[in-house]
Image (tube, rainbow, N blue to C red):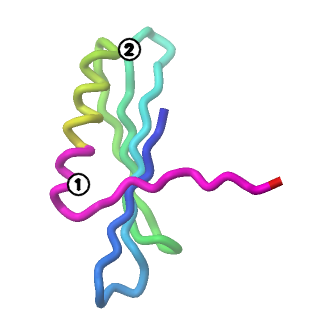
Amino acid sequence: MHILLQQIAPGLPAPRFVRLALREDLFGGWELIRESGQLGGKSQVRRELFLSQAEAREALETACAALARRGFVAQTPQLDAA
């Protein structure tokens, strides 16, 4: 599961983005992976470890709410018209 959020601010050369992803690790724990930066530029990746999926999902929801307060908007995937 992953969520892509973008913040388009006037005056910035490129929009900022944050990608949040949840995945299970090899030991039965869960990782919340946060990648952030400017589109077309360098990005930073941080990982947080959790013992349960519920804890990781709660952290993901908290992060999404905090980013929404800062002006980030979730991007919906674009489907190609066939």
Compared to residue 40, the image places residue 21 above or below, namely above
- Residue at 35 percent of width and 37 percent of height: 47
- Check residue 29 in the rendering and tell me which mark sits there, or answer none: 2
Stretch of the chain drawn in magenta: 64-81
Q: Is residue 2 located in the magenta-colored stretch of the structure?
A: no
> In the image as oriented, which residue stretches furthest toward the bottom?
11
- Under tag 1, what secondary structure? helix
79 within the magenta span: yes
Q: What's the residue at 40%, 74% (across, down)? A: 15
Instruction: Name the disc covering residue 68, or none.
Output: 1
10 or 18: nearer the viewer:
10
Position of residue 21 measured from the top left corner of the image (x, y, whole percent): 43, 37
Residue at 46% in and 19% down: 24
Q: Residue 58, located in which quarter of the rendered image?
A: top left
Image-quadrant location for residue 28: top left
Question: Which of the 4 image quarters holds residue 71?
Answer: bottom left
Going by the numbered disc 1, the residue's amino acid type is Ala
Judged left or right of residue 75, residue 47 is left
Q: Residue furthest top?
A: 28
